[in-house]
Amino acid sequence: MHRDGTDPENVQLEDILCDFCSEAAWAAGSPCIEGHRGSVICGKCLSVAFVSIVTCKVEEQEAECVMCLEKRTTPVWKGLREEAIICRRCVKQSSGVLQKSPDYDWSKPS
């Protein structure tokens, strides 16, 4: 998601916000994972999503994930924005990417 007023011809890293909280900017130094069509989830939202749908028992529902753009029946997590939904597969893949990153001290929540 882009910050309001972003020039589409000159998008800067600080213009790219987390689709789930609308707060964390990519350039702010927080870990972020990019999905399809420029969707982004920040490390803070990813941590909450991980705890919610990977370590807790969440009922499956049919929804379209903003990260992979696939519609499937799976446990999902919704961010602060109603349309921001991430599927279990994307949560697990994104957490794996951040765990391997030498740039961030990020680990799966316990």
Image (tube, rainbow, N blue to C red):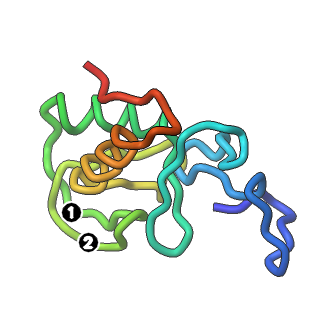
Left or right, 66 with reference to 14: left
55 over 77 or under it: above or below: above
User: In the rendering, at what x and y percent does residue 65 appear?
Assistant: 35, 63
- Classed neighbour count for the residue bearing mark 1: other residues with Cα under 10 Å, few (<14), some (14–19), many (≥20): few
| Residue at left offset 86%, top offset 72% | 7
Look at label 2 and name its amino acid: Lys
Q: Which mark is residue 25?
A: none
Please tell me which residue is depicted at 27% across the width and 49% down the height of the picture.
Answer: 76
**Residue 69 image point, x, y percent:** 36, 73
Looking at the rendered structure, the secondary structure element under dot 1 is strand
Q: What residue does disc 1 label?
A: 62
Q: In which quadrant of the rendered view does residue 86 lie?
A: bottom left
Residue 1, x across and y down, in percent: 63, 61
Disc 2/disc 1 C-alpha distance (Å)? 7 Å
Q: Quadrant of the C terminus?
A: top left
Residue 26: give x, y in percent of width and height. Answer: 66, 49
Q: Which numbered disc, 2 or 1, marks the residue that appears first in the sequence?
A: 1
Q: Residue furthest top?
A: 110
Relative to 31, residue 90 above or below:
below
Q: Which residue carries the number 2 mark?
A: 71
- The reply to whether discs 2 and 1 touch (Cβ–Cβ < 8 Å) is yes
Mark 2 Cα-neighbour bin, 10 Å: few <14, some 14–19, many ≥20: few
Vertical order, 74 against 92 (above or below): below
| Residue type, label 1 | Glu
